[in-house]
Amino acid sequence: MILAAGRGERMRPLTDHTPKPLLAVRGKPLMQWPMEALVRAGFQHILINTAWLGERIQGHYGRSSPLQGIGVAHLLYSDEAQDFGYALETAGGIARALPQLAEVFWVVAGDVFVPEFTFDALAVQQFTVSNQLAHLWLVPNPPHNPLGDFGLSQEGLALNLPKSQNAQTLFTFSTIALYRRAFFELPYCDIVPGNPQARAAPLAPLLRAAMDRGQVGATLYTGPWTDVGTPERLAQLNAV
């Protein structure tokens, strides 16, 4: 699943007429970088949730998108704006799409640039046989998030630590993760699968509760990673 429903307020005016995931980074739409990486790794069936200007994303890629020299992405959409008139946030959006997702699935935001990340099938296999509900990829803290998000234990568990602790013990959530369907069902999540009530809900509270139960694994990723959240960051990427 690629998350592509956000308004991109900090990217205005660039996002007034173009959804942020379609903004060009080094010659191709930002969201196409993870699409290509998924297809290259053998994950050809991708669901995209949309809201703001979602029709432009669907118009650009359609239901089947050939990616030159890589393969074909077979796409499904969860159009939150069309269905409800607003974006459902991350947990609400995943719950909305849940009936169309596999028992174990990747999620990545369509507005992060991670050109060297590999969506490893072995990671999926290891996660599938584990007792974890989620596995996150964390990155060193960028300047815009100096306090980080989560800790990482020596045993490879994500930790729900207060941000008042030494920032060196915390890392930033890259948005890349593996999830188990059960994580978005009772007893862990009280949103009905398919989210017919259109509940907008953030993901962090679910993750933190699961971390407290020792049910979230994590890996530190040290390759290039950029949250393309401002026009300045976009310009820096395109200046290379």
Image (spheres, grey):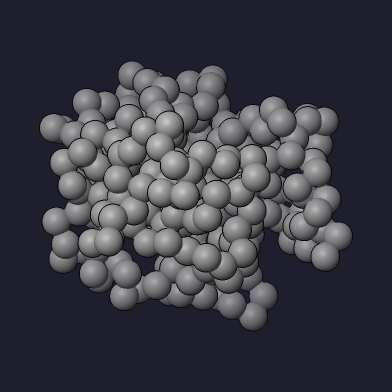
- Tell which residue pokes out farthest to the right in this image: 239
Relative to 82, is 97 on the left or the right? left
Determine the residue positioned at 74% across, 61% down.
Answer: 28
Can the viewer see residue 187 in this picture?
A: yes
Determine the residue positioned at 56% across, 36% down.
Answer: 5
Can the viewer see residue 61 in this picture?
A: no
Using the image, determine if residue 210 lies above or below residue 82: below
Using the image, determine if residue 189 lies above or below residue 135: above
- Spot occupied by residue 110 in the image (x, y as percentages of width and height): 58, 49
- Spot occupied by residue 224 in the image (x, y as percentages of width and height): 61, 64
- Spot occupied by residue 106 in the image (x, y as percentages of width and height): 39, 56
Determine the residue positioned at 54% across, 20% down.
Answer: 85
> Foreground residue, 15 or 115?
115
> Foreground residue, 34 or 168?
168
Determine the residue positioned at 13% across, 32% down.
Answer: 187
Q: How many marks?
A: 0
Using the image, determine if residue 126 lies above or below residue 138: below
- Quadrant, the C terminus: bottom right
> Foreground residue, 134 or 23?
134
> Foreground residue, 124 or 44?
124
- Tell which residue pokes out farthest to the front in this image: 166
Relative to 185, is 203 on the left or the right? right
